[in-house]
Image: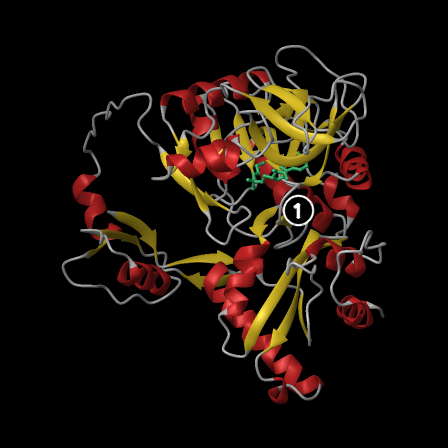
Amino acid sequence: MIVSADAGSRGGKPVPYKPLLDEAISLSKYKPEAVLLVDRGMSAMNLVAGRDQLWGNLREKHLRTVVPCEWVDATHPSYTLYTSGTTGKPKGVQRDTGGYCVALAASMKHIYAGNAGETYFSTSDIGWVVGHSYIIYGPLIAGMATIMYEGLPTRPDGGIWWSLVEKYKVTVMFSAPTAVRVLKKQDPALLTKYDLSSLRALFLAGEPLDEPTAQWISAGLGKPIIDNYWQTETGWPILSLCNGVEQAKSKFGSPGKAVYGYDVKLLDDQTGEELVGPNQKGVVAVEGPLPPGCMQTVWRDDERFVNTYWKSVPGKLVYSTFDWGIRDADGYYFILGRTDDVINVAGHRLGTREIEESIAAHPNIAEVAVVGVADQLKGQVAMAFAVLKNPALVTDDASALALEAEVFKLVDKDLGAVARPARVRFVTVLPKTRSGKCLRRAIAAVCEGRDPGDLTTMDDPAALQQIKDLVTP
Ligand code: PRX
């Protein structure tokens, strides 16, 4: 059975869900027997006879029904969440039930320090891992009330979150740096307009927390800001401060130290050697076994789980996060970005290969490279450079913009608007090595105005120059 609604709402505008759901069901091999729909009165629905049922019609009938608890093995999968990696094929992160409950219960006590009877407010999307762990399961397991907020942090104004904190006496709050950067553009007086005396701390995760953003929100709220670092794969923090165990000092720019249960190592990506000295840059890896709550496997693909996550560092069977990091002399880690082609746009994790595959499906695109480029507001944005099959169709700015708009539509449909590149630019050739490997890092460097580094393996220097000319104002 699928439970859904007629529509969601974004920025006050309805986003119809039912047509998307109908299309997904028609594409899927396994059809649900029933679809239960909540009609929020936002968008008209065509009901499929015999399959679709309206919640409003059934509610009265079942209101007092007692549903017994369904007992499952601790290892029974609770959910799968698809997440991006190096290939164009997202991986289904499979989570268990018992271990996940244990990990969440522990983290609620020792990291977030929330108590039964209080209110937790995570501003995340519910479909993101943070939404699963800390809108739904974590707070409820801890006996806390949880707030599910549908909408933007700026509507009706930039004070909406803080008005909710006052109204529901929120004690623990969880958000992402991008959202705070959005609030920075609003009236700072909104931060002090409401009574925030119940709030003990604001936790931020999902992307690097830059110091100006951390300082701004910390000063504005007068509350501790606690960065924490983790992944869809782990389900709960790898690095954080465990103030519920012992008070530790925050360091700006650092998500803290390894959380108990995670045997975190920094490894040389070439040799696999462990880097033990302070401030050495290596791949952030976790020695097995992983603590409870972490992924069990890739859904229906154990081999991919082992090969992707456990065999990427030479000579060692360790879990790789695919992030670069350093550790200072006090044991605080600093995350320095991904080792693979994953980018982080406004806290959303995207695989550049997925975006490339979507764009390459356009009939006039022969080849495309997508790279992540630093952005003040969103952390990173995707930039696409495409080679045309028929260049005669793009002769001037107007035809280029028209094609770019077509590509945007394609990506919106395949992956959602969040994956839409900031720009799609057209070139005659992509910079490649002589063996044909696209030099994405060099493209990203040029887009950010950085030195592209060693280009001795590059086949055709004019290719990179073309991109430079396009992106240089
Ligand atoms: O690159 C790291 C970055 O986000 C990735 C995981 O994204 P996702 O699977 O969407 O899970 C987010 C769960 C919070 C990581 O591999 N990342 C996450 N948190 C931080 C971070 N980078 C820097 N600082 C963080 N606190």
Q: Is residue 219 depicted above or below 110 in this figure?
A: below
- Where in the figure is residue 79, as x and y percent of width and height? 37, 36
Q: Nearer the viewer, residue 247 or 386?
A: 386
- Where in the figure is residue 143, as x and y percent of width and height? 44, 21
The count of marks equals: 1
The residue at the point 65 percent across, 58 percent down is 435
Mark yes or no: residue 156 visible.
yes
The residue at the point 63 percent across, 74 percent down is 387
Position of the C terminus by quadrant: bottom right
- Where in the figure is residue 382, as x and y percent of width and height? 65, 59
Q: Which amino acid type is shown beneath numbered disc 1?
A: Ala
- Where's ligand 1: which quadrant? top right
Label 1 packing within 10 angstroms: few (<14), some (14-19), many (20+): some
- Where in the figure is residue 261, as x and y percent of width and height? 55, 16
- Residue 238 lies left or right of residue 304; in this view the side is right
Q: Is residue 150 depicted above or below 43 in this figure?
A: above
Q: Helix, strand or loop at disc 1?
A: helix
Q: Which residue is mark 1?
A: 179
Mark yes or no: residue 11 visible.
no
Residue that lies at the very extreme toward the front in this rendered image: 434
Q: Quadrant of residue 303?
A: top left
Residue that lies at the very extreme toward the top in this rendered image: 246
Q: Nearer the viewer, residue 98 or 123?
A: 98
